[in-house]
Image: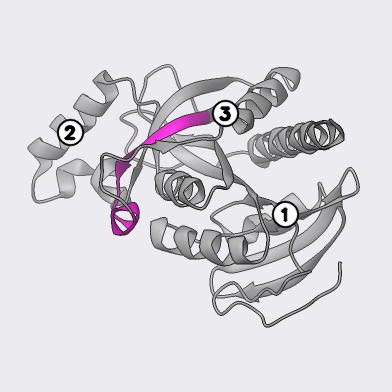
Amino acid sequence: MAVTGEKKYHIGLAKGEVGEYVLVPGDPGRTPAIAKYLDGAREVAFNREYRTFTGSLLGVPVSAISSGMGGPSVAIAVEELNELGVHTFLRVGTCGAAQPEIKIGDLVIAIGSVRSEGTPNGYVPLEYPAVASIDMVNALVEASKAAAAPYHVGVIRSVDALYSDLMPDRMPRPHQLHEELDMWSRAGVLSNDMETSTLFVVARLRKLRAGTINLCVDELGAGEIHHLDPSYMDRMLRVAVDALKLLIEHDRAAARK
C-alpha cells in the first residue's frame, strides 16, 4: 500500500496506511492483541485514543484501530476513516449483560442498538434506528458457531454514563434509573455498551458496513466489571477475525459475478 496525502487530524493516518476493512476495539491496548491475528501487521499510528496496526487477511489489507470510549470518538474515527476509503467496520468490544442468561465470557452480536447516548442526535433524530449490516451479523453468527463459542444475537443498548447503569444506587435519581434499566431488560435488550449505536448510525448514513461483537464482562445486577481470563478475549478476537475473513471471501465472490 502506497502512502498518499495528508494524515487525518485525529486518527493520524493517511491513505495507504489503513485497510478497507477495520476491527475497532475501544482500548488502545487491545490493538496489538488483534494484530497477532493479522499477517505482517505493524503499528502505523498512535494519536490520542486512536492506535492503529495494519496487516492483511487472505491477502487483503486489514487494520485494527482503537476508538477510545464513547460515541464522540467513534464518530470521528468513522468519518475520517471513511475519507481514507474504509468501507467495513467491526467493533470488538465489551458489554454488561441486561439479561440473566448472558454470562461472563459470552459473546453478544448486535442486530441493532437502542440510542441511549447523544452523539447520533447531532446527525439525525432519535426516530432513526441504529441497525447493523445484515451480512456482518450473518458472518459473526457463522464464525461464532464454528468456534463453538457461547453467543447471543439481538438488540443491545448504548449509553454515555457507564456508572449510571453500573451503580444506579449511587446516583441522584436511583429509583428512576432502576425503573429504566428494568424496562429495557423487559423489552429484551441483551446488553449495554457505549459505542455501538453511534457506529451503526454514522456508518449507515455514510453508506458503510458496520457490525458489533462484544464480550460480556458484567453480569446482570453484579454492579462491577470483571477482569477476565485473557482466553475469553482471545476467543472473541478469533471469532471476529474469522468473520472478517468470511466477509472478504463474500466480497471477492460478489466482485467476480
Local secondary structure at mark 2: helix
Question: x, y percentage for residue 131?
Answer: 45, 35
Is 217 left, or right, of 208 in this rendering?
A: left
Query: What is the distance, in whole Å, between disc 1 and disc 3 at their CAs?
Result: 18 Å
Query: Which amino acid, mark 3?
Result: Ile
Seen in the picture, residue 128 relative to 8 is either above or below; the reply is: above
Residue, x 63% and y 29% (percent of image)? 135
Q: Which residue is mark 3?
A: 134
Q: Which residue is mark 2?
A: 180
Place residue 3 in its image quadrant: bottom right
Local secondary structure at mark 3: helix
Seen in the picture, residue 34 relative to 145 is either above or below; the reply is: below
Q: Which residue is mark 1?
A: 20
Question: x, y percentage for residue 207?
Answer: 54, 47
Answer with mark 2 or mark 1, whichever residue precedes in sequence.
Answer: 1
Question: x, y percentage for residue 113?
Answer: 39, 36
Does the magenta run of residues contain 137?
Answer: no
At label 2, counting other C-alpha atoms closer than 10 Å, the crowd grade (few under 14, some 14-19, many 20 or more) is few
In this picture, which residue range is highlighted in magenta?
Answer: 109-123
Query: Which amino acid, mark 2?
Result: Glu
Is 191 left, or right, of 21 in this rendering?
A: left
Question: x, y percentage for residue 229?
Answer: 63, 38
The reply to whether callout 2 and callout 1 are in contact (CB within 8 Å) is no
Query: What is the distance, in whole Å, between disc 3 and disc 2 at their CAs?
Result: 29 Å
Residue, x 91% and y 48% (percent of image)? 59
Residue, x 50% and y 61% (percent of image)? 68
The dot on residue 253 is none
Is 62 left, or right, of 65 in this rendering?
A: right
Considering depth in this image, is 7 or 207 the residue closer to the camera? 207
Quadrant of image for the N terminus: bottom right
Does the magenta run of residues contain 112?
Answer: yes
